[in-house]
Amino acid sequence: MNKASLVKALVSLGIEVKNGKVKKPDLSKAVATDIPKYEVTYVTKAEAPEAMYYATYLEKNVAKDNYENGQDTELKTTMSEKINLKAASLQELVSKVSKEYGLPGKVSDYMAWEGGILIANLLENEQGHEVEEGSKEFESFKKGEVDLWAATYNVFIEKGSVAPVSEDELKEAGAESYD
């Protein structure tokens, strides 16, 4: 929309425009039906955008593990991808990560690392499935019959923040002063 069309639209709404500038409307003569109605919605702190948690990146590193000899020193990154999950609480976010990627479902199952990283250490078979302690596969691992993989998952977490745009920033972008 060009400036002339915008001015025409504003005038049609009863807003006075002089020399390309919007004049503050005189509401002293307005009646209730002239004022648009807005529905106000209140949200809890947990629902506010600044309280949202985001999982933004997932990385998986593995090393071959032998029950007798321990882990290989060679670490391989087998997954490194951007992800886009969000939730109102950290626990809800971890539950979503769990459902989407088959990782542990409770925050207490992870270790915390600086920079907002949750770390899960799992023991997996060659197909990437978790091997539980006490299972047949784990018992074979203990006997040295099979090797398993020590898998470390790093889930990068951010907490959203939303701030209003300043009047100066709006003006710098081309908006005119209201007065």
Image (cartoon, helix red, strand yellow):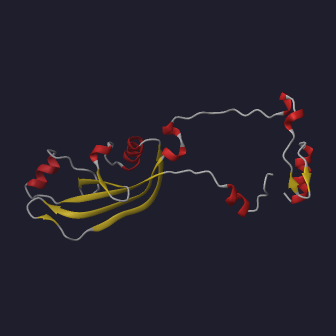
Q: Is residue 14 left or right of residue 153?
A: right
Query: Residue at 58% across / 51% down in the picture?
Result: 163
Q: Position of residue 28 (x, y in %)?
A: 87, 34
Query: Residue at 89% across / 58% down in the picture?
Result: 20
Total tally of numbered discs in the picture: 0
Q: Position of residue 33 (x, y in %)?
A: 85, 29
| Position above or below: 66 against 137 | below
Residue 60 occupies quadrant: bottom left
Q: Nearer the viewer, residue 18 or 122?
A: 18
Report the quarter where the N terminus lies: bottom right
Q: State the residue lying farthest toward the top.
A: 32
Q: Nearer the viewer, residue 153 or 88?
A: 88
Q: Is residue 15 left or right of residue 177?
A: right
Q: State the residue lying farthest toward the bottom.
A: 74
Query: Residue at 22% across / 59% down in the picture?
Result: 150
Residue 69 occupies quadrant: bottom left
Query: Residue at 17% across / 62% down in the picture?
Result: 65
Q: Is residue 98 left or right of residue 51?
A: left
Q: Is residue 22 left or right of residue 38?
A: right
Q: Position of residue 104 (x, y in %)?
A: 31, 46
Q: Nearer the viewer, residue 16 or 7?
A: 16
Q: Position of residue 142 (x, y in %)?
A: 9, 54
